[in-house]
Amino acid sequence: MPALSDATRGRLLFGGDYNPEQWPEETWLDDLHLMKEARVNSVTLGVFSWSKLEPRPGAREFGWLDRLMDLLHAHGIGVVLATPTASPPPWMGARYPDTLPRDENGQVVWWGSRQQFCASSPVYREYAATLAEDLAARYAGHPALTVWHINNEYCTYCWCDETARHFRRWLRAKYGTPDALNEAWGTAFWSQRYDAWDEIIPPRRAQYMRNPAQVLDFKRFTSDALMECYLAERDIVAAHTPHIPVTTNFMPFWSGLDAWTWAEQEDVVSIDIYPDPKDPLAGQYNAMLGDMTRSQARGPWVLMEQAAGPVNWRGVNHPKPRGLNRLLSLQSVAHGADAICYFQWRQSRQGAEKFHSGMVSHAGEHGRTFQEVKRIGADLALLGEVVTGTQVHADAVLLHDWNSWWAGRQDGRPSSRVEYEQLVRAWHQALWESGITAAFAHPEQDLTPYKLVLIPHLYLLTDAAIANLLAFARGGGTVVCGFLTGAADADDRIRPGGMDVRLRELFGIGMVHEWWPLEEDETADCGDFRGTLWSEELEAAAGAETVAAYQGGELDGLPAVLRNGRAWYLSTVPEPAALRHLLADVADRAGVRPVLDGLPEGVEAVRRGDLLFVLNHGCDRVTVNVPGHHLDLLTGVLTGGTLTLGRYGVAALREDMP
Ligand code: GAL
């Protein structure tokens, strides 16, 4: 199986989406000159080139791409070649209206933007496959080709009739009989029993709340349907180039695709990450996505897109202050990325993204953005030694599962204020601020490499996941678990007692009487800290220790934090500082240490292989104690005991043997 190392060949990849079809050919040479100046060694071509490559059905216009591939190769720049299937040309929708997706209300989603395809459409699939085949045949032997990039951010949902037929096939394969489906979906409720397969439809707009198990299966189905499209194209290109790795780029922490299952089908896992420069915790967000992607990749990964400056899809779009682009780029390397790329090379002058930054902004080569890009290119060239399969080690792992996210976010819940991604982020933040490196795992994954398992909130847990967790705990591992975990089984059926009995035993919970979600302006007094978002009327079992109890109100004296040996249960969400103290304390007891002790606030330390990255996420100069003697690969300076970092400063330290 080809690997990322086949593309990196001992260097970090640096570059971005290159959309030269938006520019006259005279610009290309200028681009290449600037790319060389910035040490760009990889560009992604063709992501949105379908209408240029196939201007009318069956036509082929490859000449411009031939010239580009040759030019890039002549300049020593590798190509991540995309199948352009994310954005079908207008002719497809005009000729084949059934390729267009329909929303939940049955409304057509028209062309004129991008991604207007129904994943179940045989016509779309056929055209996509034929073009992928022709591209692969044409460029299989081209020396510039380094990686295949299939489609782009698979994310289309569709509720059309073709999708309905496809959904039924998927359900049939899963359940076998309508009766089994009725049982799994609980269709005895509200007279929803299905007598035949063709009565089943995707969860379209309905009078009132829809069947949650149906909605959950539709999410699973859509992730699988999109994956079928990916697999079809992957297999086509792989047949031509078995030595070239294949990827598709994930959206950051996006609910639509089960990235655990997708990652298994990729030679290389890649993601697009767009931290908000205005967010004081942009660095934590970037770290979290890096940790998650590294865990999915089980090794080095590709940062396929980030922004050199502002994006254009937030309400207010802020540029990156001086130095932040560099900091976040090097941070991604520290968290395991072997490729640092952008959307996009040159800022577009037309189209919907003309206010989205590029590596070369409207200000041009003398603008600050490009000057910083050049510096990053120079920095990355100094860090080639990380690209030797070096790993980031983590003793602590956060469990995360799309199924639980999908099931838990539906209507009709105890509280619509519960946002899964915010909870995962809050727990990761607590570790990040404590200097502890985290990994992520699917709850059924092997947990034995870790000392500490953290579950921010997994409303749905399968029996296999519960067995996995119990085995980890029996083996001496420490588990910390957030509220409303293990409440539902794989079909979103509430488990007897409101929480799986094996988990209640693990955490020392006698009974969960009621859930007491909190309002936005409400907190729960837990003695030393305040709980937010949620509380529970929970009875401790004999032998369990109430570490923190609710004070006053209906839950007076009941456990907010419960401990049963090495198993901890949090029935509320402590405010950030309290969550940090609690998790740091549990980690310490579990023998999980920060990478460096005594880090100043806002300074992060991550070890990747032999390199110790120290990153200052703040604007003030800081002095950091780093025991031993080190060489900073970025500056060539030797350090002995302490290190000083300026605003957004980064050091990549290798132990210096005297
Ligand atoms: C990504 C997408 C790119 C570009 C970028 C803008 O979602 O893959 O094509 O649109 O966002 O931030």
Image (cartoon, helix red, strand yellow):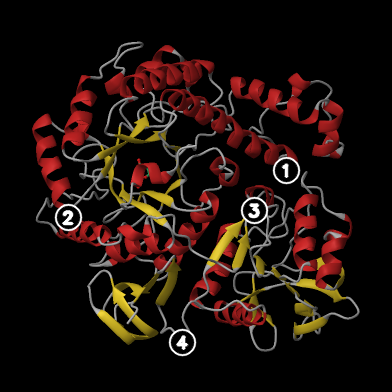
- Mark 1 CB within 8 Å of ligand 1: no
Pointer 2 local density, CA inside 10 Å: few below 14, some 14–19, many at least 20: many
What's the residue type where badge 2 is placed? Answer: Phe
| Amino acid under disc 4 | Gly
**Image location of residue 337, percent across then percent down:** 40, 55
Q: CA distance from mark 1 to mark 2?
A: 49 Å
Answer few, some or many: residues within 10 Å of disc 1's Cα (few below 14, many 20 plus, some between 14 and 19).
many
Q: Residue at x 35, y 28 (%)?
A: 112
Q: Amino acid at mark 1?
A: Pro
The residue that disc 3 covers is 442
Depth order, front residue of 438/121: 438
Tag 1 residue: 212
Q: Describe residue 196's horizontal placement relative to residue 632 as left or right.
A: right
- Inspect this view and state whether residue 616 appears: no
Q: Label 1, label 3: how many angstroms apart (C-alpha)? A: 22 Å
Image height check: is 52 above or below 257? above
Outermost right residue: 542
The residue to which callout 2 is attached is 370
Answer above or below: position of 470 versus 264: below
Of the residues under marks 1 and 3, which one precedes in the sequence? 1
**Image quadrant containing the C terminus:** bottom left
Q: What residue is at 17 percent from the left and 55 percent from the top?
A: 370
Q: Are marks 1 and 3 in contact (CB under 8 Å)?
A: no
* Quadrant in the rendering for residue 181: top right
Q: Earlier in the sequence, mark 3 or mark 4?
A: 3
Give the Cα separation between the discs numbered 2 and 4.
Answer: 36 Å
The picture quadrant where one finds residue 223 is top right
Q: Earlier in the sequence, mark 1 or mark 2?
A: 1
Closer to the chain start, of discs 3 and 2, is 2
Residue placed under numbered mark 4 in the picture: 598
